[in-house]
């Protein structure tokens, strides 16, 4: 989960063990996916994972589509990883956003997350 102004990106990337979530490969991919979602300012449906490319210069995803990035992550971690969802929320100026990351190993990444819009 990552907030930028009145916008929020929420993504869910899963793997088979908690050991993989501690790797730089997994964390970098997850952060790049959050950034991409904020840049696109819209939900990214799985049917578009073959056409939407990362704009990031991060070595782990540079010039890759989302599907190429997840395949690269699987190759580097030697573990099955998948994207569960990619969502974008745009708030109007009168709405207030709060969010909570449970067991967050690093900024914007959490084991469990919750958000509230009022």
Image (spheres, rainbow, N blue to C red):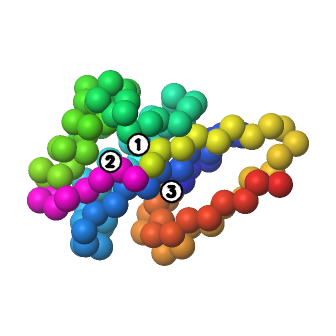
Q: Are marks 3 and 2 in contact (CB under 8 Å)?
A: no
- Residue depicted at 32% across the width and 24% down the height: 51
- Residue depicted at 25% across the width and 26% down the height: 63
Most extreme residue toward the front, as rendered?
47
Q: Which mark is residue 33?
A: 1
Q: CA distance from mark 3 to mark 2?
A: 12 Å
- 16 vs 6, left or right, is left
- Residue depicted at 53% across the width and 50% down the height: 10
Q: Earlier in the sequence, mark 3 or mark 1?
A: 1
Quadrant of res 80:
bottom left
Q: Which mark is residue 8?
A: none
How many numbered callouts? 3
Judge whether residue 61 can be spotted in this image: no
On screen, 103 above or below 30? below
Q: Earlier in the sequence, mark 3 or mark 2?
A: 2
Label 3 sits on residue: 108
Inspect the magenta stretch and tell me whether residue 80 lies in it: yes
Q: Are marks 1 and 2 in contact (CB under 8 Å)?
A: yes
On screen, 76 above or below 48? below
Q: Secondary structure at mark 2?
A: helix
- 49 vs 108, left or right, is left
Judge whether residue 37 can be spotted in this image: yes
Label 2 sits on residue: 29
Give the extent of the magenta segment: 77-84
On screen, 105 above or below 48? below
Query: Residue 9 placed where, x, y %?
Result: 56, 45
Query: Residue 60 placed where, x, y %?
Result: 24, 41
């Amino acid at each position: 989960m990552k907030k930028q102004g009145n916008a929020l990106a929420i993504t869910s990337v899963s793997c088979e063990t908690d050991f993989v979530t501690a790797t730089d490969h997994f964390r970098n991919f997850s952060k790049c996916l959050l950034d991409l979602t904020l840049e696109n300012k819209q939900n990214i449906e799985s049917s578009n994972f073959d056409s939407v490319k990362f704009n990031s210069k991060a070595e782990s995803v540079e010039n890759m589509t989302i599907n190429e990035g997840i395949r690269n992550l699987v190759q580097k971690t030697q573990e099955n990883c998948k994207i569960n969802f990619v969502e974008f929320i745009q708030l109007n100026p009168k709405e207030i956003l709060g969010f909570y990351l449970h067991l967050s190993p690093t900024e914007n990444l959490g084991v469990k997350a919750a958000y509230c819009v009022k």
